[in-house]
Image (cartoon, rainbow, N blue to C red):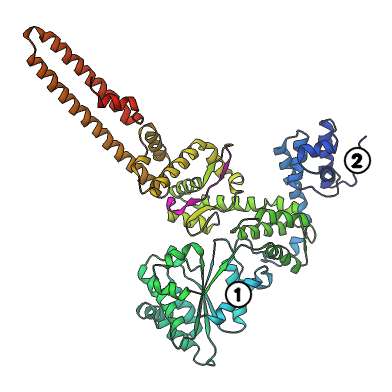
């Protein structure tokens, strides 16, 4: 016989929540916890603990308990979030200094002032510093969201400042002006004059650094750290300014009497654009550091050590959950930091808890909130493009469930893509793009609604995209083009949902041209056959006796009706379906 549950003690929110769970189980017929465990896929002890009243269970355990008792999960999720909100005032957040964001940076990059809170990348920092000591031009490469900016700003720059002068900058839309402003400030000269010199003379940066260090010992060198270097391709619209800036960097680092070392941080997918500047490729050769995804140990340090430094601890269940959420994801560190920042604000005493993480929505909520904020800030046409771009990165599996789709960057519009990449919604590598995290699909209600509205369209778009890719890979083999009803349906779909990029449109244009050509050839063949048949019938009529005129007229009438029927069949065949063997035989073999 099952053991009776212990009476609940206390009268707080946790007590009331546990009592409600017990009442739910009573209404379900009081099934044993072993039976509930089989239904909920949690251990019986975990489920029993959820209703013990010692602490608020996690959202996942709560919903599993409710489902096992045939309860309303939506209602209980609302009640769980209300309970966590009511418990939030117990947090000591009000004792924090005004303006302090806590030990986690949120979605922003760590800055030099945050160096004491930056953990997990110690080995990578040492690797970059080692390259800087031995090389004059170093490139730090990594995927969007891999933590490059935090590495350079909170890891590398503070360490450099301890041993040599350094200047940190981002390129922005006007890299010459940004560089001139930073270097001029270090040398106390006019930024306007320096910018003009940088545009005219690639040696201007090199000479300016020599001037800045003129009073320093000969072995002192300046390190110029350029973060978000990919912006010279994505934001700088002037090819001349871009070329001048690159020439200035390379010259400053390679001059025989150089006292400049350059470190650039850039997205890995920008390497192809670097090939447009051979001098840049040569400077980067042999001096590249790749920012790989964090190892389990590095991630453990990044999660736990900021809290420890702030005098707090991280609950084991929370640590396991975050590690599981991030496993296999190379570009979600900003989302993890944002979720932990919200968890910090909901901590219980000096402990960051799984309940606080789930109350904040975890990575799912951080990503969904970012997506909705971006979408709401865009004008109408840009909202439509964002919708189409995101749906291009979604497919529907065999079970009719949406899933992320990795697609070629050639299928997407670059301008719209950059906005999504900057917001950490889309991740890029050298050739492909995909949605940053699978959780965005169910977590963002707006995207979920788009998917539900257009499941059939997602399948059509995926089939169309695959067909266009196969056509290109086969050197545009005409036999792979669409025709007939399939082409008509595809054109209708694209007209209502214009795809980003031009691959699909190019494929459909080629398909349309081929079908029109095929139709013209069919008509020409039918016309030629009709003329030949008329000539043959007329010749036979002339050779026949006068009494056979009616027969000749009858034969001519039958031929005319046959031509008309064949023309109709040919038109139907060329526009609605591929020609069959019987239709080819009919056209090739006149009666």
Q: Is residue 551 left or right of residue 208?
A: left
Q: Position of residue 551 (x, y in %)?
A: 14, 9
Q: Is residue 88 visible?
A: yes
For label 1, count other residues whose C-alpha is less than 10 Å away and answer few (under 14), some (14-19) or many (20+): some
The relative height of residue 97 versus residue 403 in the rendered view (above or below) is below
Work out whether residue 228 or residue 310 is closer to the camera in this orientation and state it: 228
Q: Position of residue 89 (x, y in %)?
A: 76, 55
Q: Position of residue 36 (x, y in %)?
A: 81, 37
Q: Quadrant of residue 492?
A: top left
- Whether residue 405 is in magenta: the answer is yes
The residue lying at 61 percent from left, 68 percent from top is 110
Residue located beneath label 1 in the image? 127
Q: Position of residue 379 (x, y in %)?
A: 46, 50
User: Mark 1: which secondary structure?
Assistant: helix
The relative height of residue 307 versus residue 207 in the rendered view (above or below) is above
**Which numbered dot is residue 557?**
none
Which image quarter is the N terminus in? top right
Residue located beneath label 2 in the image? 5
The residue lying at 7 percent from left, 16 percent from top is 542
Question: Which residue range is magenta in the image?
Answer: 400-412
The residue lying at 57 percent from left, 61 percent from top is 145
Which residue of the protein is positioned furthest toward the top in this rendering? 547
């Amino acid at each position: 016989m099952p053991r009776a549950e212990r009476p609940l003690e206390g009268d707080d929110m946790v007590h009331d929540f546990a009592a409600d769970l017990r009442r739910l189980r009573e209404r379900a017929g009081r099934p044993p916890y072993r039976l509930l465990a089989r239904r909920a896929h949690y251990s019986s002890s975990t489920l029993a603990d959820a209703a013990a009243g010692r602490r608020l269970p996690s959202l996942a355990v709560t919903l599993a308990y409710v489902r096992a008792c045939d309860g309303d999960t939506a209602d209980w999720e609302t009640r769980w979030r209300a309970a966590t909100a009511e418990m939030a005032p117990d947090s000591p957040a009000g004792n924090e200094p005004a303006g302090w964001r806590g030990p986690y940076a949120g979605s922003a990059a760590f800055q030099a002032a945050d160096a004491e809170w930056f953990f997990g990348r110690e080995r990578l920092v040492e690797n970059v510093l080692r390259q800087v000591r031995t090389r004059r031009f170093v490139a730090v490469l990594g995927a969007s969201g891999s933590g490059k900016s935090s590495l350079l700003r909170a890891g590398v720059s503070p360490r450099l400042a301890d041993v040599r002068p350094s200047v940190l900058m981002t390129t922005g839309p006007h890299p010459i002006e940004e560089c001139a402003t930073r270097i001029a400030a270090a040398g106390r000269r006019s930024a306007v004059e320096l910018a003009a010199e940088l545009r005219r003379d690639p040696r201007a940066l090199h000479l300016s650094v020599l001037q800045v260090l003129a009073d320093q010992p000969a072995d002192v060198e300046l390190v110029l750290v350029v973060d978000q270097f990919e912006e010279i391709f994505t934001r700088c619209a002037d090819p001349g300014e871009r070329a001048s800036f690159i020439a200035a960097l390379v010259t400053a680092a390679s001059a025989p009497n150089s006292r400049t070392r350059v470190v650039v941080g850039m997205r890995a997918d920008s390497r192809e654009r670097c090939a447009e500047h051979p001098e840049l490729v040569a400077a980067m050769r042999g001096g590249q550091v790749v920012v790989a995804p964090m190892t389990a140990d590095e991630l453990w340090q990044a999660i736990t050590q900021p809290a420890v430094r702030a005098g707090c601890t991280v609950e084991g269940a929370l640590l396991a959950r975050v590690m599981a959420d991030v496993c296999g994801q190379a570009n979600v560190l900003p989302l993890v930091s944002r979720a932990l920042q919200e968890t910090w604000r909901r901590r219980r005493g000096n402990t960051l808890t799984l309940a606080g993480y789930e109350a904040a929505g975890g990575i799912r909520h951080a990503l969904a909130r970012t997506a909705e904020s971006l979408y709401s800030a865009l004008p109408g046409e840009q909202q439509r493009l964002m919708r189409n771009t995101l749906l291009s990165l979604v497919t529907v599996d065999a079970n009719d469930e949406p899933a992320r789709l990795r697609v070629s960057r050639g299928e997407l519009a670059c301008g719209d893509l950059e906005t999504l990449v900057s917001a950490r919604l889309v991740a890029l590598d050298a050739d492909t793009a995909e949605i940053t995290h699978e959780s965005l699909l169910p977590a963002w209600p707006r995207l979920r609604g788009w998917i539900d509205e257009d499941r059939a369209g997602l399948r059509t778009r995926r089939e169309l995209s695959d067909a266009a890719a196969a056509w290109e890979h086969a050197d545009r083999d005409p036999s792979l083009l669409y025709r007939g009803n399939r082409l008509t349906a595809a054109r209708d779909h694209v007209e209502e949902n214009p795809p980003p990029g031009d691959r699909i449109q190019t494929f459909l244009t080629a398909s349309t041209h081929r079908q029109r050509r095929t139709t013209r050839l069919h008509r020409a063949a039918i016309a030629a056959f009709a003329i030949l048949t008329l000539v043959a019938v007329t010749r036979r009529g002339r050779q026949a006796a006068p009494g056979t005129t009616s027969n000749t007229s009858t034969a001519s009438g039958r031929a005319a009706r046959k031509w008309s029927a064949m023309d109709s069949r040919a038109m139907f065949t060329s526009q609605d379906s591929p020609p069959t063997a019987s239709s080819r035989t009919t056209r090739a073999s006149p009666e």
